[in-house]
Amino acid sequence: MASDTPSMGASKRTSATSGLRNSQTARPVSPHTPQPRARWLRAGFEGSSAPVCVVGFGPEDSRRAGDYRGWIQGSIGAARLPEPVDMEDWTRVYELWRPDSREVDLGLVEDKIERAFRETYNQFLLTDAGTSRLVLVLPSLMPHPLLSSLLSTLFSRWRFPSVTLLSSAAMSATAAGLRSALVVDLGWAEATATAIYEYREMTTKRTTRSMKHLMQEMGLLLTGLGSDGSQVTETADKISVGFAYCEEVVSRFAWCKSQTEEDTSSDEPDQKLSIPSPANPEDEYMDVPFSCLAEPVEKVLFAPGIAEHELDDEEKSLPLLVYNTLLSLYPDARGTCMSRIVFVGGGSRIPGLRQRVLKEVSLLIDRHGWSPIRGKALERQRQRLEELRLSAQKASNKPETPKSNGEEAPSTDDEPADPSKEVPEIDFVEQKLRRQNRDIPVPIQGVLREVESLGPWAGASLTTSLKIRGMVEIEREKFLQHGLAGATRDTDQPVPDRRSGLRSGGDRSSWTLAGWA
Amino acid sequence: MSRPFPYTYISCPCADTPVPDPARKRKSRESPQKSPQKPPPERANTDQGKKLSAKEEQRGEDEDEEQTFDPRSPRSNFSLYPPEQLLYCEECHQIKCPRCITEEIVSWYCPSCLFETPSSMVRSDGNRCGRNCFNCPVCTAPLAVSTIENATGNGPQQGPWVLSCGYCLWTTLDIGIKFDKPTNIRSQLQKMTDSTASGAFDRSRQASRTFGDLKHPLSSYASVDEQSNARERDEEQAGPKEDPAAPPMGPDARFAALKNFYRTQIAETSNSPNDQLSSEFGFSSPGALNRLMSLYTSSSRLSGLYGGSKKPKSKPPVMREALTASEGLQIAPEDEKDMIARLQSPECGWDGMASIDQRATQSPDARFVDDLLPLPVLLRTKRAKRCKSCKHILVKPETKPQSTRFRIRLIALSYIPLPTLRPLALSSSSALPAMAPTPDLNSLPPLRPIHVLLTLKNHMFDPVRITLATPPVTPGHVATKVTVLSPQFEIGANSDVWDEALQGGSAPLTSDSRSAVLRGVPEAGKVWDKGRNWTTVVLEVVPGTLPGSSAEGGDGNPDTETNDEDVLAVAASKQDGDVLEIPVFVHMDWDADAQLDQQNVGKGSKPDDKVTRELAYWMVLGVGRIQASL
C-alpha cells in the first residue's frame, strides 16, 4: 500500500490498512484509521494526513512479555547472522502474513494482530480500543481465511461496532485527487498494477518482482561483499547479513539508474560510498561502489537481459506489468489511466525508480503500440503494409491532420493498421460536446504522466473524514453471528448513500464483501 | 530464554480458547452453547497423568487442543507472561493476561514533564506533549532548551533559543531553527515548520474557499474558465507552470487541499440538478426552487422544462478530479537526479541518511537527517483495566500522573502461588551444602541428571492443594526427561507470621526443613522442604542432546519446510534451541470462604460455608541452556 513505508525501499508491507473511527460522541475528534499490511501496520485517526504510528512486525515484536533481550543485546537483525540462512526463512519472521495462506499459521497471525493492535492503541492512539468505528484499508485481493481471522480477532477482542473495508488501490487514487488512475503498488510480496476508472477497479495485474525479492537480492549482494568470496559456492543462496541491517541499506541507498547499464558505468567514475561493513556492521565501515547498490533494483524489478517471452506471467518486469495492464484496458480508460499513474508502496521511495519505469513503458509503447500481437510474421506484414501505405501516401500526398486531443497513445511509428493512427479526422460530436462543456476542463489523456499520491492510508483518512460510507461495512452483530459466510453473494447491492448522515435505506439488513468476496 | 536463568513463566489460560471464528461456529451451532464440563482428559503422561484430577479449567476446549503446552511454539510467546504481570479476576476466578482484559484510559500525561493533559486537548495535540518536551529525532534522548551563548552576553538569558540534545549533541541549529522565546516551543516550531508549506497551503485554502465556501457563482466560473483556457493553451504546461510558483506542498498541506477540494466537489454535485440551477441563478436554497418548479411542472415532464432552459443539461454534474496544485494534485518530478546525486555526494554518506527508526515518526517525505524535526514527547496514559468477560475492574490507578498508587489492583500473585526455581547443589558430599557447587545453568551438560527445586509460595489465606504434571519428555527437538518427584502436595496458608511463632506448631516443620537440607538426597514422593506458606519439591531433569551436536549432525538443515509453523519453529528455535524449558501443568484447589452470591449456588459447598475453588494453568520453567557437546 501506500506510502506506507516509512522506510522507503524496504517496503515490506504487504498491505492492509486499517482505519478506525471513533464514533464516540463525547470526543470531538474521533475516528482512527489503522492500515495493516504484510509488514507494517499504520494506524491513525480519520482526517489526519499521516498515520499516528507505523508498527512493524519482526522478531522483536514476537518476544514474550518480559523478554528484554532486544534492548539488552541490540536487535536481532542488526548484526551478522551466525550462520547463513535460506532466503525465504530470512524474511519470514518479518512478515505478518504471506499471500499464500497455505503457509500461514492463522493462529499466530491472530496473536500478532492482537498484540499489534493492543500496543498501537496503548502507545500511540491513546484512545480506548473498540469504542470507535474501524476502517481497514486492505489490498483488494486478500485470502479469505486471513480476512476472516483478522475480522474475528478484531471483533471478538474488542467491541468495534463496525469495520469498514476500503480497497487500497482506490484509496491511493483518492489520495492523489484522481478518479481514475493506474495504481502501481510496489509492495512487499508482490507488485501490483491496478487500473482504477471512476473509482472502480478495472483490472489488476501482479508480479512477484517485489520488495521482498529486492531485499533478498540486496542481502545476497551484501553477503557477497562481506564474505570476500571465500565460501561463496556452498552458500550460494544463503544470506548471512542481518535483515535489519539490509533493510537499512535498502532504505537508505537503494537507487535506480535512469538508463540501462552502458553509459552510466562509463560517464562517471565509480563513486565510493562508505557503508557499515556487512561483516561487522556494528563497528566497521567499508567502501562500496555506489553503482553496485543499484544493481539489485535493476535485477529484481527490471529483469534486464531476459526476453519478455521467457518470463512467466507472474514474474513480468515492472515496465511490462504497467504496459500489460494498460494494454488490457479499453482505449478510453487506457488513455485516462496512462496519464494518471500513481506509484505507492515502499518501492516507490527508491530514487529514480518511478522515472525509469515510465521511461521503459514509453519505450514499449513506441515499439509495440497498443497491440498485443508480436512476432516475426507481424513484422513482415507490417513491412508490407508500410510499403503499401508509402505508395498510397505518395499518391494522395495528403498532409497529416493533427491529432485530436490525445485519443490514443502517441503510438507513432507502428502498425499502420492500428486504428489509432487513423483517428485524426475531427470528431464533430466531440467538438460539439466540448463547446458545450467549455467550463469543464478537458482532462489530460493519452500522455504518460505520473501523479503523486499521499498513499492509501491518507486516502482512507480523507474518505472517512468526508463521511463517505464504504460499500463493505461489516457490523459487529452480523459478523459474530455468521462470520464471513454471512455476506451476501449479491455484489450488485444498491450503493449506499454517499453521506452517512442520510441513512437513506435505513440500516442495511445484509452486507456484502463486494470486491473481497 | 528471555531472562536470567532460572525463570518461570505462566501461560494465561486464555490461550486455550481460540478466537472464535463465527463461520466455524455456525457449523456446530447444533451443539448446546454451554457444553457440559468435559471429563478430565487423559494425559499421555505415564507417571503423573493419572493423578491429574478433574481439570475443569479446560472446559470448552476441543479435543485437539488438549495437548501438552509447547513453550517452543511461536504462538506460546504471546500467551506466556512473567507471573508478576498477570492479573486475577475475582468474579471469574481466573487468571487474566493483557489479552483478556479491556482497558479504559483514566488520564493522559507527558512522561517528561508529568503534566496531565486534559482529554479534550489530547487529540488536537496529536497525542504529544504540547509544552516544551521534545525528543531528539536522531537518538531519541530528551532535548533541552538552551540559549546560544554569546561571548559577550552572559547576563540574563537572552537571545535566540535552541533545543539541544545532551547525548548526541544534535541541536535545532543543525536544521536552522531558532526560537525567540524559551517557552511554548511547540507552537513556535509548528509555525516555523508550516511556513515552508504555508504559502501553498494558504493559497490553496483561499482558492478552494473561492470555489466552495463563498459559493459565488461568478467567482467559481471565472476561475474554472481560467483554468480551462490555460489548459487549452497548453495542456502540458499547466502542471509545470504552477510548480515553480508554489513550492511543492508538504503532505499536510496537500491533504488539506485535497480535503477542501473533495468537500467542494461533493457540495457542488450532491443536490443535482437543483444545484445546477442554484449555482446559475443564485438561488440559495435549491429545495425551495425545486418545490416551485414541481408546482408548475406536475403534468409535464421535468426534463422538458430543463430542455428549454438556457443551458440544457440533463446530466447531473459529475465530480471531477483535482486539476491544479491548489486542489491537491501533484505531478511527480521529472527525474530524481538531484536526489541521487545527493545520495552519492560525500557529505551525505551513511550517516546523512535517516534510518528507518528515525523516519518512522517523521513525515513520510523525510529522507535525510536534515529533514528530521524535533519530536514532541509522546503522551502516556494511565489505564483502568477490566475483565473482558465480566467487566469487573481489575486495576484502577489514581488519576494524578505523579502518583504511583492504585485504588484497585488485583494482581495474580495474590491468588496463585509464586513459583521460584533454583538448582539443587550437586553436593553429595554432605559437608557444607551452601558451599557445594551448583550446576552452571548456562551450560548444562546433556544427559546428566540434575535436580532443580521448585518452590511454590502461597499468598492466600487458605491452604492450597497442588498437583503438578509435566510431560515425561519435553516437546521440541531436544528431548529432555523430566520427573516431578512429588507431584501432589499442600501449601500452608499465608497466615500472620506471628501465628507461626505463637502457635509453636512450626517446630516440626522447621526441623523437618533442616533435616531436609541435610538429607541431600531427593526422594520420590517426598516433599523436599516446607515452610509456613511455601513448599519446595524436586524436579529431576535429564537434559537431552541438542540436534546437530554430536549424533545428529545432519539435522541442522531444515527438512521440515513443509509448513509455516514448522519453519517458524525452526527459525525461532535457532537462537534459543538450546534453552531447556519445562512445561508444567499446575492444578490447584482450595476451600475458600463462600461469597454471598455463591452461598446458595454452592456447587461444592462444604458445611462450613466453604467453597472449593480450582484453578489450573500451564507454567513454563526455564531451567538453563544445554551445552552443545558432551
Image (cartoon, rainbow, N blue to C red):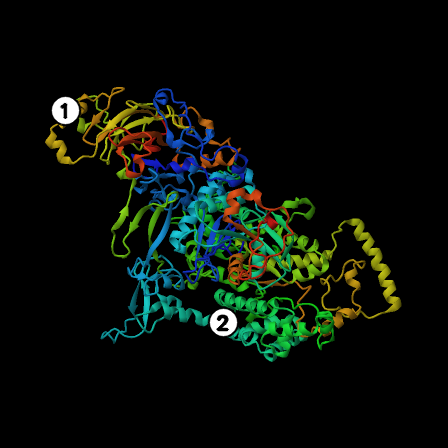
User: Is the residue A470 above or below the residue B321 in the image?
Assistant: above
User: Which quarter of the picture shows residue B88?
Assistant: top left
Chain under numbered label 1: B
Per the image, the residue denoted by label 1 is: B508
Quadrant in which the C terminus of chain B is drawn = top left
Q: Residue at x 69, y 74 (%)?
A: B296
Q: Are marks 2 and 1 in contact (CB under 8 Å)?
A: no
Specify whether residue B337 is in view. Answer: yes
**In the rendered image, the vertical position of residue B393 relative to residue B140, given as above or below:** above
- The foreground one among A299 and A478 is A478
Mark sitting earlier along the chain (2/1): 2
Instruction: Name the residue rendered at 41%, 34% in the picture.
Output: B72
Task: Please identify the quarter of the rendering in which residue B300 is found.
Answer: bottom right
Q: Which is more toward the observer, A260 or B83? A: B83
Q: Nearer the viewer, mark 2 or mark 1?
A: 1
Left or right of residue B461, residue B394 in this image = right
Between residue B361 and residue A277, name the one nearer to us: B361
Residue type, mark 1 in image: Pro
State the CA–CA distance, disc 2 to disc 1: 84 Å
Whole-percent x, y for residue B472 in the image: 37, 23
For mark 2, give the secondary structure: helix
Please indicate, yes or no, whether residue A269 appears anywhere in the rendered image.
Answer: no
Same chain for the residues under marks 2 and 1 in the image: yes
- Asked which secondary structure carries label 1, the reply is helix
Of all residues shown, which one is farthest toward the right? A395
Residue B201: which numbered mark, if any?
2
What subunit carries mark 2? B
Q: Is B521 rendered above or below residue A143?
A: above
Residue type highlighted by circle 2: Phe
Residue A68, percent across and down? 34, 44
Give neighbour class at mark 1: few <14, some 14-19, many 20+ (Cα, 10 Å): few
